[in-house]
Amino acid sequence: MAAVLPSELQQAATQVQRISLLKDDADFVFNFIDPSKPLEVVGAGGHTTHAARDTFPALVGTGMAMTLGFLDACSINTPHTHPRATEFNLVMNGTLRAGFLAENGARFIMNDVPALSATIFPQGAIHFEANLGCEPVIFIAAFNNEDPGVLQIAQRFFGLPGSVIGASLGGLGVEEIEKLAGLIPDNIALGVKECFDHCGLKRPETQPTKQQQQRVGGNAFWE
């Protein structure tokens, strides 16, 4: 039997109709560690798996989503926003350093969040989670929107036209901008060298950069 599309569930008039469209009881269970499930993001420092309306259709109509994050030692879930949701982040083990910046004029908030404690990131706020410890950390992030969205700050900013980036950074030239853009690693990224040294770990020399914004037409560096 063909899988039910989220669009079909969205068109259902009632929750009873949505439940009837999901024929198998197992349609209401999401396995975050199922190897057949697509990973949301993969970087040199870890990965995340998310249950949202596109990966778990049973969420359609609930206004909820969830991400399970795996941060290796000395790694960071780099600054990003969720344009359509507030995040409630629960640390399962170890400690995460978590911080956020809300709108212009709001102060910066940062905390070291220990195991079985949680922190909040308001909708649209730029935020990050860093594992400064020597062991992997798992977190669970709950969202109040079944399609919270993710906007990675560095990758998206350096995806703007070169002239806009240059002006925003005090007049940098295209060559300087292109060089900086090429250094932006995929999320989840490696943390600072000092953490690796403290933990007696060797920091890899390179990281993947496949998540960088494509440059065609209006945002091309060289026209």
Image (cartoon, rainbow, N blue to C red):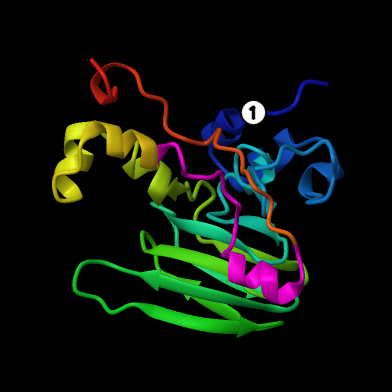
Q: Amino acid at mark 1?
A: Leu
Kindly indicate the quadrant of the structure image that contains residue 9: top right
Coordinates of residue 66 in the picture (x, y in percent): 63, 57
Residue 34 position within the rendered picture, expressed as x and y whole percent measured from the top left? 85, 44
**Residue 185 as seen in the image, left or right of residue 20:** left
Vertical arrangement, residue 212 with respect to residue 144, above or below: above
- Asked whether, in this view, residue 29 is left or right of residue 53, the answer is right
Q: Quadrant of residue 8?
A: top right
Quarter of the image for residue 7 reads top right
Which residue, given by chain and number where applicable, does mark 1 sit on?
A: 5
Quick one: label 1, few (<14), some, or many (20+) residues within 10 Å?
A: some
- Residue at 28 percent across and 16 percent down: it is 217
Residue 200 on the magenta segment: yes
Can the viewer see residue 120?
yes
At x 60%, y 71%, the residue is: 194
Q: Residue at x 24, y 32 (%)?
A: 174
Viewer-proximal residue, 96 or 61? 96
Q: Is residue 159 magenta?
A: no
Numbered disc 1: secondary structure: loop
Q: Is residue 48 visible?
A: no
Q: Nearer the viewer, residue 21 or 184?
A: 184
Using the image as rendered, state which of residue 156 and residue 37 is in the foreground. 156
The region drawn magenta spans: 181-201
Is 108 located above or below residue 205 in the figure?
below
Q: Quadrant of the C terminus?
A: top left
Q: Position of residue 2 (x, y in %)?
A: 77, 21
- Whole-percent x and y of residue 207? 61, 43
